[in-house]
Image (cartoon, rainbow, N blue to C red):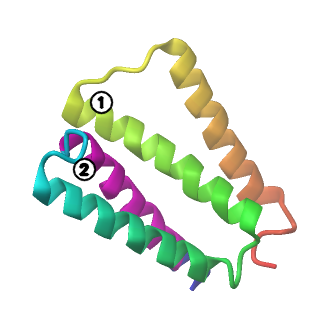
Amino acid sequence: MGYINLCIAIIAEVIGTTMLKTSEQFTKVIPSIIVIVCYGTSFYFLSLVLKTIQLGVAYAIWSGVGIILIAILGIIYFKQIPDIPAVIGMLLIIAGVVTINLFSQTVGH
């Protein structure tokens, strides 16, 4: 159940962050409300994750996957193309998340 909650937390955070861009500094009401609801949802489900996954591991996965998904959405919806150093950095984040999940003894404990 921990990873299901983590997926919900990540998806809510990604939607909230995407809407943060479209809220135009909280001047547009609907996107602003979505930001608040999604961030609240994300943190609620992240708190549930902490029952089964250690804080550092959960946060690393939550933030790392969120960064990658936001970068992809930035490319698709906002035409924000990352440069080579940004791509390399994101690949390192992916490598870190994979390493934690494959080799860490703290995942799920």
Magenta residue check for 10: yes
Amino acid type, callout 2 = Met
In depth, the one of 85 and 12 nearer the eye is 12
Residue 89, position in %: x, y? 61, 27
Q: Are marks 2 and 1 in contact (CB under 8 Å)?
A: no
- What residue do we see at 75% from left, 60% from top? 56
Amino acid type, callout 1 = Ile
Residue with the mark numbered 1: 75
Q: Secondary structure at mark 2?
A: helix
- What residue do we see at 24% from left, 34% from top? 76
Q: Residue furthest right?
A: 105
Question: Above or below — where is 58 with respect to 3?
Answer: above
Foreground mark, 2 or 1, reads: 2
Quadrant placement of the N terminus? bottom right
Q: Earlier in the sequence, mark 2 or mark 1?
A: 2
For this view, does 47 lie left or right of residue 34? Answer: right
Q: Which residues are magenta?
A: 5-22
Total of numbered circles in the picture? 2
Q: Residues within 10 Å of mark 1 (few under 14, many from 20)?
A: few
For this view, does 84 lie left or right of residue 56? Answer: left
Q: Residues within 10 Å of mark 2 (few under 14, many from 20)?
A: many
Q: Residue furthest top?
A: 84
Residue 106, position in %: x, y? 84, 69
- What residue do we see at 83% from left, 57% from top? 103
Q: Is most of the magenta stretch helix, strand or loop?
A: helix
- Label 2 and label 1: CA atoms lie apart by 15 Å
Question: Above or below — where is 82 with respect to 105?
Answer: above
Residue with the mark numbered 2: 19
